[in-house]
Amino acid sequence: MNTENVIKVCLIEDDKMIREGYVFLLSNTPNINVVSSFSNVEDALKRIGTDMPDVLLLDIELPGISGIDALPKLKKLLPDTYILMLTVYDQANHIFRALGTGASGYLTKNSSPEKIISAIHEVMEGGGPMSANIARMVISSFQRSDASPLTRRETEILEHIAVGKSRKKIAEELFIDLETVKSHIKNIYQKLDVHSKEDALKTAKEQKFI
């Protein structure tokens, strides 16, 4: 196995059976290496900085510090790690708080093993995977303002970003080349005066531009 292409994954999940199930699944998946797993955030914070995972699967409902409350701490400790929320909850307030605090994707625990594995690969390629029901909830929450500075195409691209699609996927679905997508995203950032995907989505949501 080429270790240069191996994705290092960490898990924080309090249910032992679920945690061990994920560890077994991912440990037996080519090019994925489970570097550590924890039952709570407090233990994870002591060690995860040295584990340096590429992707962290984080449960929301945890004993002690909850997954959402832990997000800022974990992002500060692991700024380059992609965090996928993996939970039984799909309420809108949980979703938007998690995505607005640095989560890269949001999957419900009834997601198939194939979906979980594909989500790990997708997030490494710049996507933000979501379960289908969560993506529908995000889209249905959009209440667009007529005062938006974004063009129709920029709004369309931002909506695709909001439901977790990578730049490559957006280009394919809109039948435009990747450089055009990148140019639109640059314009979106300038118009919203932001420097990241998370800030762009947060600003657009608050101002009802999407």
Image (spheres, rainbow, N blue to C red):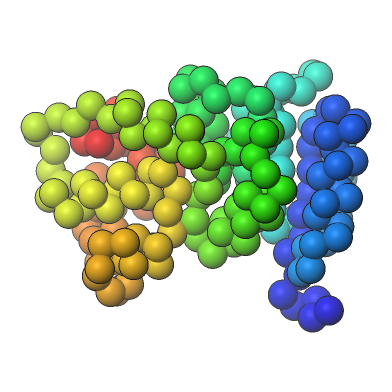
Quadrant for residue 74, please give it.
top right
Q: Furthest-bottom residue in view?
A: 2
With respect to residue 5, does 209 lie above or below? above
Q: Nearer the viewer, residue 81 or 171?
A: 171
Q: Position of residue 31 (x, y in %)?
A: 77, 69
The residue that appears at 52% across and 42% down in the rendered structure is: 130
Camera sees residue 81 = no
The residue that appears at 9% across and 32% down in the rendered structure is: 146
Quadrant for residue 109, please give it.
top right
Camera sees residue 29 = yes
Relative horizontal placement of residue 160, taking residue 114 as reference (left or right): left
Q: Position of residue 101 (x, y in %)?
A: 52, 34
Q: Nearer the viewer, residue 207 or 163?
A: 163
Relative horizontal placement of residue 107, taking residue 31 as reference (left or right): left
The residue that appears at 90% across and 41% down in the rendered structure is: 20
**Looking at the figure, which quarter contains the N terminus?**
bottom right
With respect to residue 50, does 101 lie above or below? above
